[in-house]
Amino acid sequence: MWRFKPWLPVIVWMGVIFYASTDIGSTQHTSRIIRPLLRWFKPDISEEAIHDVQVCIRKSGHVSEYAVLAVLVWWARRKAFGGSGWTRKEIGVVLAICALYATSDEIHQIFVPSRGASPWDVLIDTGGASVGMLILWAVGRLRRRRS
């Protein structure tokens, strides 16, 4: 049981990602927030610019949610199994877990009428996980330098 406890935040975050992959996270729903906000800041903004900003925000969401997932997976593995967590194998395992979940997330979106699956999103998600690991590594280096 003690090895399962560190994985709870990972499971919860995967649930958040799964929920965002339903209709609630579709372009139609997110545009209800982004479009009026952009029009409020810049009333004469073009539809093309709104679309471009929306795509940028949505893809940034992919990067950030998988960066968080990678950090949580790394932390859970370290707490559950010990070790430094900075071997190539450990980083590869974390990225593989995130890539597999990203793939399953895109497969899930095939069955959501207002969503679509994209192999590009799997690459963006995996890139986001890599960003999370790079940030974690950089923070660790800064902490070691200050010590």
Image: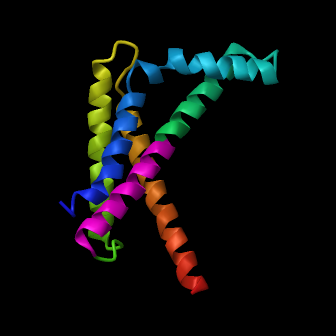
Residue 79 in magenta stretch = yes
Coloring scheme used: rainbow
Residue 106 in magenta stretch = no
Q: Quadrant of residue 87?
A: bottom left
| Quadrant housing the C terminus | bottom right
Q: Quadrant of residue 23?
A: top left
Vertical position of residue 21 compared to residue 4: above or below = above
Q: Quadrant of residue 85?
A: bottom left
Vertical position of residue 38 compared to residue 66: above or below = above
Q: Residue furthest left?
A: 1
Residue 127 in view here: no
**Residue 109 location (% of width, % of height):** 33, 24
Task: Please give the name of the residue rendered at 55% of the width and 39% of the height, measured from the top-left corner.
Answer: 60
Task: Please give the name of the residue rendered at 31% of the width and 61% of the height, measured from the top-left corner.
Answer: 76
| Quadrant housing the N terminus | bottom left
Q: In the visual, does 40 lie left or right of 123?
A: right
Task: Please give the name of the residue rendered at 21% of the width and 63% of the height, measured from the top-left corner.
Answer: 3
**Residue 15 location (% of width, % of height):** 34, 37
Vertical position of residue 6 compared to residue 65: above or below = below
Number of numbered discs overlaid on the protein picture:
0
Q: Residue furthest front?
A: 1
Q: In the visual, does 11 lie left or right of 137?
A: left
In depth, the one of 34 and 87 nearer the eye is: 34
Task: Please give the name of the residue rendered at 33% of the width and 55% of the height, measured from the top-left corner.
Answer: 95
Q: In the visual, does 1 lie left or right of 142?
A: left
Residue 114 in view here: yes
Please provide the residue range marked out in magenta.
63-82
